[in-house]
Amino acid sequence: MIVAWVGFASIGIITARYLKPLWLSHSLFGVRIWFAIHRSSMLAALIFVCIGAICIFLHVDGFVFVCVFFCVNFHSKNMDFIKYSD
């Protein structure tokens, strides 16, 4: 995910912001070159973010719901009748 956000997303943002005036008469596959670079780098960022999220879920063996604040307060105040066995 770091490669996606620091690398590809930054290239896409900088390309869209600063490279529009360059290559005015050139095009790549029917679109201007700055837009082709922007689109491909943002697509690469999306792919790397998805791969990173999948790797995180595989590392922790799936989605694990951890209730920290609300569940502790909810169980301690409203569910005193439940006995937890050790």
Image (cartoon, rainbow, N blue to C red):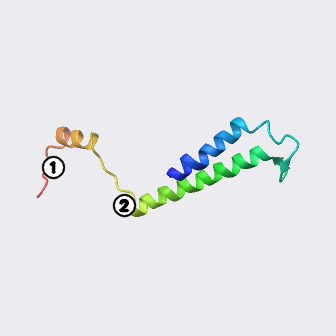
Q: Callout 1: few (<14), some (14-19), or many (20+) C-alpha neighbours within 10 Å?
A: few
Alpha carbon separation for disc pair 2 and 1 = 29 Å
Instruction: Please state the horizontal and vertical placement of residue 77, each as a whole percent of the image.
Output: 18, 38
How many other residues sit within 10 Å of disc 2, few (<14), some (14-19) or many (≥20)? few
Q: Looking at the picture, tell me which residue is in the foreground, 71 or 54.
A: 54
Residue at label 2?
Answer: 60
User: Can you give x and y, in whole percent of width and height, for residue 72 in the image?
Assistant: 22, 43
The amino acid type found where label 1 is placed reads Ile
* In-front residue for pair 63/32: 32
Which residue, given by chain and number where applicable, does mark 1 sit on? 82
Q: Residue at x 70, y 46 (%)?
A: 38
Residue 61 relative to residue 44: left or right: left
Which residue is painted at 64% across and 40% down in the image? 13
- Closer mark to the observer between disc 2 and disc 1: 2
Q: Position of residue 76 (x, y in %)?
A: 17, 41
In the image, residue 36 above or below residue 56: above
